[in-house]
Amino acid sequence: MNRLLLPLCFLAAPLAADPLTGAEFDAYATGKTLTFAENGQPYGAEQYLPGKRVRWAFDQDTCKEGIWYEQGQNICFVYEDGFAPQCWQFFIESDKLKAVFQGESGTELYEAWTSDGPLSCMGPHVGV
């Protein structure tokens, strides 16, 4: 019996793309405001500013200022609230970002919308 042998590359699982480096992430995100979704539901939005600065809004009204930095294959975020850094790995899938949290939850977020405009943030004590 004559069998067709397939090269091993057809039998192995496809390799996952490497996470973005800090320089790749910076080139992709700086100057944009990205809205992320989880399982098709809005999760939050982040504005990526020059100098590795960010502005995050989990809801539409309250923004947190912060910075990001590269640590190994992770992009880590520290915000003004003083909580521990939140580290993610970012990948490009179908020309959009996918973010995978590097913690117990393993949360995966996907870029749902992109804007060149700023986040609409309420100032402190507005209406008080």
Image: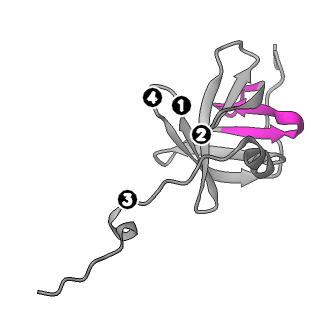
Identify the mark nearer the N-term, 2 or 4: 2
The answer to the question of whether label 1 and label 2 lie on touching residues, with beta carbons closer than 8 A, is yes
Asked if the residues shown at circle 4 and circle 3 are in contact, with their CB atoms under 8 angstroms apart, the answer is no
- Tell me the CA gap for discs 4 and 3: 25 Å
Was residue 7 drawn as part of the magenta stretch in this picture?
no
Q: Element type at marker 2?
A: strand
Stretch in magenta: 45-64
Pick the front one: 8 or 113: 8
Q: Nearer the viewer, residue 19 or 127?
A: 19
The structure residue drawn at horizontal position 54% and vertical position 43%, both measured from the top left corner, is 109
Tag 3 residue: 13
Residue type, numbered disc 4:
Ser
User: Nearer the viewer's eye, disc 1 or disc 4?
Assistant: 1
Magenta span includes 47: yes
Q: CA distance from mark 1 to mark 3?
A: 23 Å
Residue to which mark 4 is pinned:
105
Badge 3 density bin: few <14, some 14–19, many ≥20, Cα 10 Å = few
Which secondary structure, mark 4?
A: loop
Q: Nearer the viewer, mark 4 or mark 3?
A: 3
Helix, strand or loop status at disc 3: loop
> Horizontal and vertical percent for residue 50?
88, 39
x, y percent for residue 96: 63, 56
Q: Which residue is mark 1?
A: 102
To which residue does mark 2 refer? 89
First in sequence, mark 4 or 3: give its number. 3
